[in-house]
Image (tube, coloured by chain):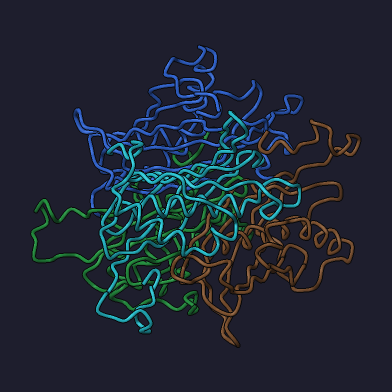
Chain colours: A green, B blue, C cyan, D brown
Amino acid sequence: MEDWTQQQQAHPEVRARIRASFERQGLMRHLGARIVHIAPGCVHIVLPSRPEVTQQHGYIHAGATSAIADSAGGYAAFTLFPENSSVLTVEYKINLLAPAVGDHLEAVGTVLKAGRTLTVCRLEVFGVQDEHRSLVATGQQTLMCVKERPEQPENHPSSRPATLT
Amino acid sequence: MEDWTQQQQAHPEVRARIRASFERQGLMRHLGARIVHIAPGCVHIVLPSRPEVTQQHGYIHAGATSAIADSAGGYAAFTLFPENSSVLTVEYKINLLAPAVGDHLEAVGTVLKAGRTLTVCRLEVFGVQDEHRSLVATGQQTLMCVKERPEQPENHPSSRPATLT
Amino acid sequence: MEDWTQQQQAHPEVRARIRASFERQGLMRHLGARIVHIAPGCVHIVLPSRPEVTQQHGYIHAGATSAIADSAGGYAAFTLFPENSSVLTVEYKINLLAPAVGDHLEAVGTVLKAGRTLTVCRLEVFGVQDEHRSLVATGQQTLMCVKERPEQPENHPSSRPATLT
Amino acid sequence: MEDWTQQQQAHPEVRARIRASFERQGLMRHLGARIVHIAPGCVHIVLPSRPEVTQQHGYIHAGATSAIADSAGGYAAFTLFPENSSVLTVEYKINLLAPAVGDHLEAVGTVLKAGRTLTVCRLEVFGVQDEHRSLVATGQQTLMCVKERPEQPENHPSSRPATLT
């Protein structure tokens, strides 16, 4: 297994491709999430704590915690995919370890195994308060690399990504 | 295993308790989700499709799909919990089976096994378009029943739910 | 979603192909497991209770419970695969709901979604004692269909199934 | 999160308690598995490759891979439990990353979060051939600490561990 966790930035073209994709994710913008680090095989996403992302006790909702973890893992995989491909989440599993509290959450997706078709990521989410950083969730995710078929116009019926087929 | 999937409504007090909790979930309101069915051991949550919940291809984001699935399972478990208890998600796993499309998504959480401490739910999310309803995600979730300690004031430090401890 | 749970037997050729594969699984034979039902998209495997499959309290070990669940799901998927393909488990998740007791366990793998590349199964394991049958474990599994390359001899290095690549 | 991965041996009493429990696991003995390292929060189990643990292609079966991973995680948690308690697997999820080949497999269970009731472990399985060691599976597991009730004789009906209740 190669060490994908090195912290250097990804190639500028890869970062541009990922930022462009991230900005098309209406959910991330609506939640207030920002992508803050894009390295080869490792992406960090930050989610500020605010009432719009809470559960019934005032902590950050498991669904919001998972959403940034899923996106961090998906983009971590995407940094290693060839051009003209897209990424789909096949599945993930996440354990919520502690109440998600702090000024903000930081989700870290890290590629554990990069394959031609499937990639597996580790997901970690930290609650960050001032200098303190504690693990609030940890997970594991399977992603699929889907080759795009550029010869088909965007609105052609068969250009719809056929997940799992 | 008892059949928890019967579709009758839960007791009015249970429904009131769950609606009150759901309304405190800032995330559900922010996403536009509504709780539409509360039966013993089975809860349905609906999420209308709109740009605020999409991923980069315009489908509903796996994070939004998961968020309503997590809440549906959590409240399904909660219908069977004693008074003066709260529910915490320990973990869940979800497979995204098909692009999440439709007028809206409907998440169904169903208790498979209710225990004193831990409860296990099945999670299903359907994409609904007119009369057509197709399964877009399926998962499994573990929840914990946490007894509240009413002798402590709400803002007492030790009244913070200590997940996993 | 089609109803894969119909209980008719699979086509004789499919059953023969699956029985032949099952008999090559040294682990299943070593554990004493038998394949007892092969329907399209649904396979049952039985494991008699005996000291060789126990954990430290005398119940059947989660690893044995999982092993037959994994095989049941894998072969359930395999019933729907084209000829000249093989099946690989990508991942699975299993909840152990109750002590695995009984004369024998019966694992049921059922296809939830069959895709060209990936298939998702539900896994259930029942403890069976006389007439009584109770759910002891439930899970969810992702499988991959790998096309065999018949032009390569069996012992050719590149004929090794390259999982996840 | 404390660093549980330090490689020093656990206290002799803890090691003795774990070896005694491991030897009661009929499945581990039947598979030929051995426990080779017991540190606080980290346990290693080795499984030699032989025909009795294979799947249909001659690789080690996912069920055997999972069984040693499950036991490694369970005992890793158990090293941190109080006396007069036992450990139950609540659930786990595992990704099979590559064909499980080598002279033997080595499963490593590592505690990520230790709680009073629930503990979460990382599971890793390596295929080892001569000097080469490669990751073949990775997973995540939730375990429960069950207090034993010594006032009840072993064969008293209510001394049966009531998983999830």
Q: Quadrant of the C terminus of chain C?
A: bottom left
Q: Residue furthest right?
A: D151
Q: Is residue C158 left or right of residue B38?
A: left
Counting from the top left corner in percent of width and height, residue B12 is at: 50, 12
Instruction: Name the foreground residue: D155 vs D36.
Output: D155
Q: Is residue B118 left or right of residue D59?
A: right
Q: Is residue A159 above or below residue C57?
A: below
Q: Is residue A152 above or below residue C140?
A: below
Q: Quadrant of the N terminus of chain C?
A: top left
Q: Residue at x 58, y 43 (%)?
A: C105
Q: Residue furthest bottom?
A: D131
Counting from the top left corner in percent of width and height, residue B103 is at: 23, 34
Q: Quadrant of residue A127?
A: bottom right
Q: Quadrant of residue B131?
A: top left
Q: Is residue A96 left or right of residue A17?
A: right
Instruction: Name the foreground residue: C3 vs A83.
Output: C3
Q: Residue at x 67, y 45 (%)?
A: B164
Q: Quadrant of residue D8?
A: bottom right
Q: Residue at x 37, y 55 (%)?
A: A90
Q: Is residue B80 above or below residue A37?
A: above
Q: Residue at x 63, y 63 (%)?
A: D68
Counting from the top left corner in percent of width and height, residue C54 is at: 69, 51
Q: Residue furthest top?
A: B12
Counting from the top left corner in percent of width and height, residue C28 is at: 54, 58
Give the mark count. 0
Q: Is residue D165 left or right of residue A25?
A: right
